[in-house]
Image (spheres, rainbow, N blue to C red):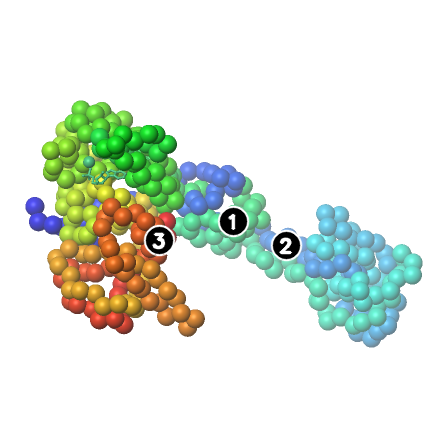
Amino acid sequence: MALLPVSEARARILANVKPLPAEPVKLADALGRVLAVTVKASRDQPPFASSAMDGYAVRGADVITVPVTLRVIGTSAAGHAFTGKVKPGEAARIFTGAPLPGGADTVVIQENTESKAPSSVTVLETARPGQNVRARGLDFARGDVLLPAGICLNARDIGLAAATNAPILRVRRKPLVALFATGDELVEPGNKPRKDQIVSSNCSALMIMARYFGADVINLGIVRDSLAATMRTIAKAREADILVTSGGASVGDHDFVQEALKRSGVKLDFWKIAMRPGKPFMYGRRGRQHVMGLPGNPVSALVCARLFLKPLLDAFLGLPDDPPMEAKLATPMKANDGREDYVRATLAIAPDGARTVTPFPKQDSSMQRTFRAAHCLIIRGPHAPEAPAGVMTPILMLDF
Ligand code: AMP
Ligand code: MG
């Protein structure tokens, strides 16, 4: 099988993927969830003309010429409306958030008044008619679109939903990802590796990454390099929307994942990608389940997850693809071969906003430290010609 271009692999993975159904969620649990339906205002905010300051509600015409002394006929406080009407020559004591009494159209702040007795107030400074009054519906009016469908909810979104008295929101169900790592050399973090073993890092990183991109995760842990063990674990992942495996994806004597997937009913679509890192990336489907076999090398695994798992999660959640970015090469780069190259790099942003990328000199796919320190990946297309310093290059931000 020829190596499949990255873009074609992604297109095949995303073919016919529809957003998952909506489910209700309480505001307290809505952070980061993707809104499935537009939220419209069910009421006006504020629901009545209200005072923006502490002071006196007056008729604007009464305070054109100052000083003027007015009769105080009552008090309107937040949550305690004054039901009387302010007539010419009258005022009502008023506090922030309180309904403006009938007849009044202006609030004079208390700093601009003097009151010797509760029944009267002298206005010392004139006020513009309507000053310090929030009109009914200033913030939003019944029927206004407050939150569009398809956004990832943040604290401000949730506050606005609360303000319009929507205690429950309809959000996309989270895709369920099941994952496991394969390898006789692996132990879980916190255990004592034998001399010939290493600590498994892929499950930890992939689990957090999938959650960060909106999924629920079942971590099935480490599976030994055996066909039977791999098949037993694949069987445990039935419920998942996406099964992700790490390692054992090549064709070595100890690589059982491809065979185990096939024998478990997965129809493999492709298993080799024209990219670096991450050539041995497998993809297939088992019924409605998507299956991704990631390479074991940590950097390859995570770059493949970013390139293929993230867009699939986005599609399940109804989120748009994030747009590509560009930056200027700080150093020249050699001509590329037929594999699309994802090169770990640091990104510097100058005060004028100009972005410059510098690749790390060593790019071995086992080196997690440079992956951790990288800000982005420089994308070098298949057969990209030699690139001198200063040319613009596409980059993929590493924001997970
Ligand atoms: P494999 O794809 O199974 O041939 O593994 C390729 C390389 O990645 C080997 O050096 C493995 O030891 C390493 N590797 C595989 N799985 C993991 C993992 N879960 N965490 C860290 N390294 C791994
Ligand atoms: Mg292995």
Q: CA distance from mark 1 to mark 3?
A: 29 Å
Circle 2 sits in a helix, a strand or a loop, which is it? loop
Q: List the single residue furthest toward the bottom.
A: 65
Which numbered disc covers residue 373? Answer: 3
Res 277 visible: yes
Query: What residue appears at the point 27 percent right and 30 percent down from the top-left corner?
Result: 194
Observer-nearest of 102 and 349 = 349
Residue type, mark 2 in image: Pro
- Residue 110 position in % (x across, y down): 80, 62
Res 21 visible: no
Left or right, 270 with reference to 232: left
Q: Which residue is mark 1?
A: 155
Please determine whether, in this image, residue 128 is positioned above or below residue 47: below
Mark 3 C-beta closer than 8 Å to ligand 1: no
Q: List the single residue furthest toward the left.
A: 1
- Residue 106 position in % (x across, y down): 74, 65
Q: Which residue is mark 2?
A: 46
Q: CA distance from mark 2 to mark 1?
A: 20 Å
Query: What residue appears at the point 24 percent right and 54 percent down from the top-left corner?
Result: 363
